[in-house]
Image (tube, rainbow, N blue to C red):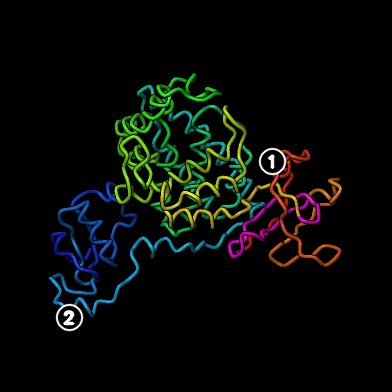
Amino acid sequence: MPDKVRIQVNDLQIGMAVVELDRPWIETPFLLQGFTIGNRADITALQNYSEYVYIDPSSSTIPAKANTSAEKKKAAPKETFVKRLFSGKSNAVTAPVEQEVKRATVIRENTSNLVKSCMDDLVVGNAINEEKLKENITETVDSIVRNPDAMMWLTRLQKKDSHTSQHSVNSCILAVTFGRYIGLPKEELENIAIGALMHDIGKLQIPTEILNKPGKLTPEERRVVHKHPLMSRNLLMAAGRYLAPAVDIAYTHHERIDGSGYPRGLRGTSLTPFSRMIAIIDVYDTMTSEQVYRAELAPFECLKHLNQNKGKLFDQQLVSLFIKMIGVFPVGSLVELTNGEIGIVITSNRDDNLRPKVLVMLDSNKMPIERKIVNLARKAVDSLGRPIKIAKTLRKGDYGIDQQKLLEEGVEFTVLN
């Protein structure tokens, strides 16, 4: 570490390179452990969370002293560290889907079983196998880094499970995929994976007759459910250092940007980027999964809900990036094309999310045909020369299509970059 200089937050200037705070980074909204101040909003955020910080003079674009008026005019405004990070640039895949999905299936099953065991141990006060959990998290992150579409497909195939672990594993996959998409380093991917896996552990202390109630909750039952973020926080704080990254996420993932969330009614800059990310992911997976009180909703319906509430309930920039990552037609979606054929979205087209690659299974009469892959990005046309598009999404299992069997049989895929 180069020489660093301690400076009071009231003396901070645009262009200074912050390398250390007077408190742990995890307790602040800053994703990166070290960044260059880009504008006044960065300074305000630092002033809200710290009394003093350490800067690296050699990396700063201005000296560590108060600017003169002339110097302030010369200092060119820069993007904030958040905007630089959330660029929406996806990383290239290094493994084809049909190859990665075989490994991903095993990894996901192992992680699911381990997380269920760890959660149950934490609730009764037993120690968890940190090394084994860390190993599984690393394997999950590595798989998603190689090819996120494999794990994303698996999240669409899981059957209803009343145990909190299923939602937690799905949230983990979504969180790491999202983190990969916006360019988080591997260390941060593992941190958000831990947070996503454990964010709802407090629900295991909620009576099952409330959690699994098929009808509307009473006001008292709702108050009980609203206690689970605090329960999650307390369980994780007592669990040891390895689960520390999960504490803030667990406590704040139901808070909302406008202060309407719970349990504390936090708003705006009080919420860390990881908490904002998990808030979106938690809602998305819950809405697109079957619940005791309703059937699963189509991803499009959930994305519409998120989009309508961005900037109000959810972080506007993160919602826009999340929708772009998921696509209008997520991997694993069963769809009907405008020519009447039925197929499954097998890869995302990150340049045009309305035109993914579709594995066609049934013809226009809804009869099985030899499987063919239609790349809508290449402007496929029907017999009359009309462009083929996706007409609508269908529910899982419509027309008897068994996606799990399809994955077991194996299909060749090419990821669109």
Q: Is residue 345 magenta?
A: yes
**Stretch in magenta:** 338-360
Q: What residue type is labelled 1?
A: Arg
Viewer-side residue, 33 vs 343: 343
Image quadrant where one finds the C terminus: bottom right
Give percent across and percent down for residue 364. 84, 51
Q: Which residue is drawn at 21% across and 72% down?
A: 58
Tell whether 160 sits left or right of 176.
Answer: right
Residue at the (46%, 43%) spot, across then down = 137
Q: Residue at label 2?
A: 70
Image coordinates for residue 181, horizontal then vertical, percent? 49, 57
- The secondary structure type at the circle numbered 2 is helix
Q: In which quarter of the image is residue 77?
A: bottom left
Tell me which numbered mark, 1 or 2, is placed earlier along the sequence: 2
Name the amino acid, label 2: Ala
Q: How crowded is mark 1: few (under 14 residues within 10 Å), some or many (20 or more)?
A: few
Quick one: 213 or 400, which is closer to the camera? 213
* Quarter placement of the N terminus: bottom left
* Residue 337 in the image: above or below residue 220: below
Mark 2: few/some/many CA within 10 Å (<14, 14-19, 20+):
few
Residue 254 in the image: x percent, y percent? 40, 39
374 vs 192: above or below = below
- Front position in the image: 109 or 343: 343
Residue marked by disc 1? 395
Residue drawn at 71 percent across, 67 percent down: 378
Residue 3 falls within the magenta-colored stretch? no
